[in-house]
Amino acid sequence: MSGADDAPPREILLDPAHPAWDEPAPDTFVARFETSAGDFAIEVVRAWAPIGADRFHNLVRHGYYDDSRFHRTVPGFIVQWGLAGDPEVTAAWIDQAIPDDSAVVASNVRGAIAFAFTEPDTRTTQVYINAVDNTRLDAQGFPPFGRVVEGMEVVDRIYSGYGEDSGGGVRRGDQSAIVAGGNAYLDSEFPLLDRLVRATIEPPQP
């Protein structure tokens, strides 16, 4: 990284207005996730949801998701994450919404990934992977921007024993304790949650 990315990583994470966040994503790219359950990889197709793909690309490349927790895993539905382990970082991003993409191009089939949101134009940092075919979410305006291309069996074994109790969703759950306490809260109250150790963008193939 160079130019705008020369600032210290934490300085960038705490400043959503930093120019480092403005880089458009490649047309396609692969993000690899190292987790306590194993590794999985997501291929992002920017044409499916360009605004969402750009936000996801920058969150991954600047380390936003590193050392966080899969705080919501609902069997037969989704695996969700996206609240930073550091509450100060979460506070910087909690209201940094992006506009909706204009259409749902890809479908919420098993393995597809999309941003969670409450109302229109409120996507911020939380994403989910569909554990099953959830095509009903298409009509609700959730546009996938990528899909799991490696390690779906890892996604399947991410700890789900707490269900909605460990934070719930952005629509009906109470996430205030996670926002305020980050990893310290989750590790104390829900110690079996799997950890997202590190997310990286794979170099493009020659």
Image (cartoon, rainbow, N blue to C red):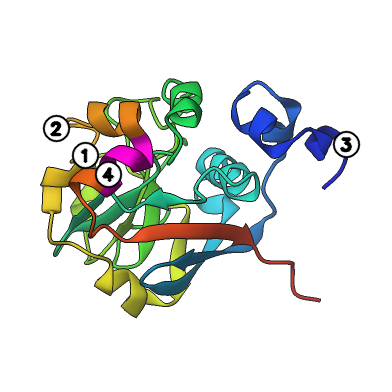
Say which residue label 4 marks: 186
Compare marks 4 and 3 and give the one earlier in the sequence: 3
Q: Mark 1 — residue? A: 169
Q: Secondary structure at mark 2?
A: loop
Amino acid type at image mark 1: Gly
Taking the image as shown, residue 190 lies to the left or right of residue 61, namely left
Q: Which residue is mark 2?
A: 172
Three-letter amino acid code at disc 4?
Leu
Query: Would you call the spot at circle 3 few (<14 residues within 10 Å), some (14-19), or many (20 or more)?
Result: few
Residue range (magenta): 182-187
Image coordinates of residue 204 in percent, x first then y, are 74, 68
Residue 93: percent from left, percent from top: 48, 26
- Quote the CA–CA distance across marks 4 and 3: 36 Å
- Residue 168 sits in quarter: top left
Which of the 4 quarters of the picture holds residue 12? top right
According to the image, label 3 marks what residue?
3
In the displayed structure, 110 sits above or below 90; it is below
Residue depicted at 13% across the width and 46% down the height: 164
- Distance from disc 2 to disc 3, alpha carbons, whole Å, reads 41 Å
Q: Nearer the viewer, mark 2 or mark 4?
A: 4
Q: Marks 4 and 1, how far apart in space?
A: 15 Å
Q: Is residue 155 left or right of residue 67?
A: left
